[in-house]
Amino acid sequence: MVLFEEIRQCLIEGDIPGVVEGVSAALEQGMDAEHILNNALISGMTTVGQLFEDGEYFIPEMMMAARSMQEGVALLKPQLIAQNVKPLGKFVIGTVKGDLHDIGKNLVAMMLEGIGFEVIDLGADVAPEKFVEAVKQHEAHFVGISALLTTTMAGMKTCIEALKNAGLRERVIVMVGGSPVSQKYADSIGADIYAADGASAARKAKERMLAN
């Protein structure tokens, strides 16, 4: 559909007014909110993630696209709630205790929302028990744990141990990331997924969710 493609292209270009105008026009024409979400917004955000992974887009372009997505979803939300449209999955995310960095974590959260996840963002300096509490409360499918300092990386293992002790480890998929984190470290602490950036985090989470 031409209008969907126009919305999609505006999102890819980070054109917030264009996305808002397009989504508003689609709703005025009586188009289904879920179709707009899937075929224009999520489709566009998936392309943005691929462009980032291919080295054609960088963090500023991703941020603008994600903000465009958020504005579009805000317009759709009343209809989506009325239609009882379910998210792709629930994703609890936060930066480990003692670490106040959140830019990378925020970008991951926006990318996850952009492809259809419901994100419960706990912020920075998050204690292990808060991750556990959020998983229980929201019946989350994923936990995303970020660390930007080598001195706080050990907190990731502590969070995974807390999930084990609470009897939740088997039912939740743990993703870790952050500049000092590597695949080797993720394997050593028993994480399920390592993601180097927001685009790969979103792609890997979606692949894992659809495979389950």
Image: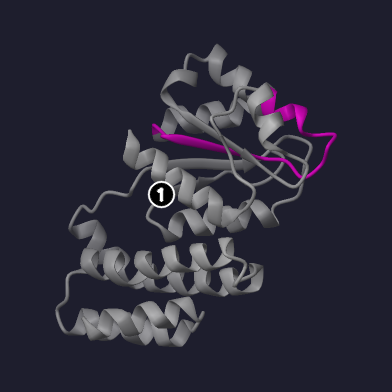
Left or right of 141? Residue 124 is right
Q: Is residue 105 magenta?
A: no
Left or right of 208? Residue 29 is left
Residue that badge 1 annotates: 118
Q: Quadrant of residue 186?
A: top right
Mark 1 lies on a secondary structure that is strand
Q: Quadrant of residue 7?
A: bottom left
Using the image, determine if residue 209 lies above or below residue 45: above
Query: Crowding near pointer 1: few (<14 within 10 Å), some, many (20+)?
Result: some
Residue in the picture at 50% in, 81% down: 13
Residue in the picture at 31% in, 64% down: 77
Using the image, determine if residue 15 lies above or below residue 148: below
Q: Percent x, y for residue 195?
A: 60, 44
Count of marks placed on residues: 1
Q: Percent x, y for residue 99?
A: 77, 41
Q: Which quadrant does the C terminus fall into?
A: top left
User: Which region of the structure is painted magenta?
Assistant: 139-157
Q: Is residue 155 magenta?
A: yes
Foreground pick, 191 / 36: 191
Foreground pick, 50 / 116: 50
Using the image, determine if residue 201 lies above or below residue 3: above
Residue in the picture at 33% in, 47% down: 88
Q: Percent x, y for residue 32?
A: 17, 70
